[in-house]
Amino acid sequence: MELKDKKIVIWCGDAPNQRALACKIAAQFNLAGIVLDEHKVTASKHKQPSFFQKLVDRFRFAKIYGAWKNLMGYYNSQYPSWPNVPVLRVPTVNDERTALFTKEQGADLVVVSGTALIKKPLVSLQVPAGIINLHTGLSPYVKGGPNCTNWCIANNEWHLVGNTIMWLNAGIDSGNIITTERLDIRQAKSLNEAHLRVMEHAHDLYIRCIGYLLSTSGTPNSIPQNSIAEGNLYLTKMWTAAQRKALLANWRSRANNRNFPDIKTVPLPNA
């Protein structure tokens, strides 16, 4: 089967950056369908901040919130519509219709980005070339959320900014790694530019990885994360005002940070 005949199905969130990724994939490969996870899940039982607390937080850390808002605005203007392929909208990616739709489209490869945590039995769906996942962070060093680039800046760990493509498993950003690449954002003029650089790099890395997987005749990369390093898992509830304050302080002093130690990454073969 030629590369142009191999079919891709995307499972992704319904956000402008995911729409941009889908459009980029459709421009180079045979995109057969899209499953949109609308994230209609039960609200968290954890205590939520009051409206006043949210207002104060967004005013105090406007640069952080604004960077993501501007990023979404950019992709919304550049990619106003989804590719012209069959689309299935589900309240959560784990809906039983996801597997059926994927099989109906004859997927050779499933590409995942921005969905809820994928659970069994969906995570075990048999697809010829497999199911791969994009993590906009450098695994295994930085995993979780809500945004790994922000965590790296807040921790003053500039050398850990990057992206990962991995085989999907049932954990949080814990699958065997296909490829990782680092990205130096210290020269970005603003947080807006920094986040755009990271997302554009993520999309580019994903495109290159898809091409590699669909064209390789050998056994593709599959590197266990624990063979590289232990790393840290960050959760949204850990992203407090203290971390946001540290991010802003470290961003202002980024030019003074020259620490960029060598770490182990996983390059694409022949890349």
Image (tube, helix red, strand yellow):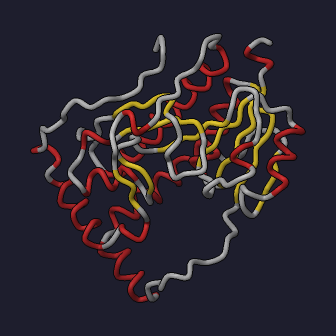
Q: Residue furthest right?
A: 104
Number of marks in the image?
0
* Residue 165 x %, y %: 52, 35
In the picture, measured across the screen, residue 232 lies left or right of residue 112, that is left
Please report the residue visible at 46 percent of the width from the left and 37 percent of the height from the top: 164
In the picture, measured across the screen, residue 116 lies left or right of residue 189, that is right
Please report the residue visible at 27 percent of the width from the left and 44 percent of the height from the top: 189
Please report the residue visible at 42 percent of the width from the left and 31 percent of the height from the top: 180
Q: Residue furthest left?
A: 256
Q: Residue furthest front?
A: 227
Q: Nearer the viewer, residue 19 or 216?
A: 216
Please report the residue visible at 34 percent of the width from the left and 76 percent of the height from the top: 59
The image shows residue 212, relative to residue 22, as above or below, that is above
Q: Please identify the quadrant where the N terminus is shown.
A: top right
The image shows residue 15, relative to residue 51, as above or below, that is above
* Residue 63 x %, y %: 33, 62
Q: Nearer the viewer, residue 115 or 84?
A: 115
Q: Nearer the viewer, residue 20 or 7?
A: 7
* Residue 47 x %, y %: 47, 85
